[in-house]
Amino acid sequence: MTGNLIEQPRTHYIDVNGLAQMFGVGRSKARLMMDALPSVRIGSKDYVLGTRLDEYLQEHGGVLIKWPKRKR
């Protein structure tokens, strides 16, 4: 093995539960955040790459979410 493989940063993927823990919000709000973020779907779950999340937060200063209208 070469030393280059060890020196490269590992990419980590964050799921909805990870977002909820990271921002201290519930699963519903974390799901809305995931929809607003540049996420990827792997199998049946959505993930956001940790570096992409950092870039998004630096560019936008936060994650703007909007609760959907209530259906009556």
Image: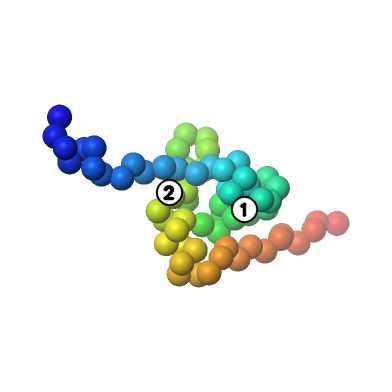
Q: Compared to 55, does 27 lie above or below? A: above
Residue 15: x and y, percent?
A: 53, 42
Return the residue found at the far right: 72
Q: Which residue is identified by label 1?
A: 23
Q: Which quadrant of the figure has residue 21? A: top right
Q: Which residue is identified by label 2?
A: 49
Q: Nearer the viewer, residue 27 or 58?
A: 58
Verify CB contact (< 8 Å) between mark 1 and mark 2. no
Kind of element beneath mark 1: helix
The amino acid beneath tag 2 is Leu
Kind of element beneath mark 2: strand
Q: Compared to 8, does 68 lie above or below? A: below
Q: Between marks 1 and 2, how big is the CA–CA gap?
A: 16 Å
For the point 56% across and 65% down, which residue is it? 62
Q: Compared to 30, does 59 lie above or below? A: below
- Res. 30 visible in picture: no
For the point 43% across and 48% down, which residue is it? 49
Q: Nearer the viewer, residue 22 or 15?
A: 22
**Residue 31 shown left or right of residue 38 in the figure:** right
